[in-house]
Image: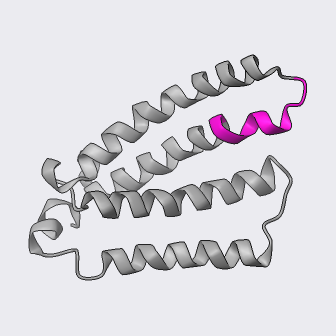
Amino acid sequence: MPNGVPVWVWTVGLLVLSNAFMTFAWYYHVKQKAWTLAAAILVSWLIALPEYVLQVPANRMGHVDHGGPFTLPQLKIIQEAITLAVFTVFTVTVAKERPTWNDVVAMLLIFAAVAVSMMGRMGPANAAAGGQ
């Protein structure tokens, strides 16, 4: 990877960026009451296109079959945690809503799932591939 940045950092970074686009595509229209349903669909689709441009390379480079350190289940669990982090920032800053205490507890449990998924999975082959 460029500049000696580990593969896992590129993978997670691209997933964060892709998720920012997808969160806007999925939820920004909810607060746009003047938009018709057709306009909301069109704008959301246009916002979602860059998400795929970022997400596809992130998952390919991060997967063990392409030299990355992660299995498919790990990539999915990481993606879910990123989704919640990005969504929380979006909810508070753009939608002006606050998560409740039980929302926060549920999100923390998903972050715990990421930790559990990673336990024992960074073996020598995976570490050499991208866990530098």
Q: Where is residue 81 drawn, in percent x and y? A: 51, 64
From the viewer's perspective, is residue 5 above or below residue 2? below
Q: Main secondary structure of the magenta part?
A: helix
From the viewer's perspective, is residue 67 above or below residue 102? above
Q: Where is residue 26 drawn, in percent x and y? A: 65, 39
Q: Where is residue 106 drawn, in percent x and y? A: 63, 75
From the viewer's perspective, is residue 63 above or below residue 44? below
33 within the magenta span: yes
The number of discs equals 0
The segment highlighted magenta reads 25-34
Q: Quadrant of residue 9?
A: bottom left
Q: Residue furthest left?
A: 125
73 within the magenta span: no
Q: Quadrant of residue 101?
A: bottom right
Q: How is the image coloured?
A: one colour
Residue depicted at x 83% and y 64%: 98
From the viewer's perspective, is residue 55 above or below residue 62? above
Q: Quadrant of residue 78?
A: bottom left
Q: Where is residue 85 drawn, in percent x and y? A: 60, 61
Q: Is residue 128 shown left or right of residue 131?
A: left
Give the position of the C terminus as an image quadrant: bottom left
Q: Residue furthest front?
A: 37
Residue depicted at x 14% and y 60%: 129
Residue depicted at x 69% and y 59%: 88
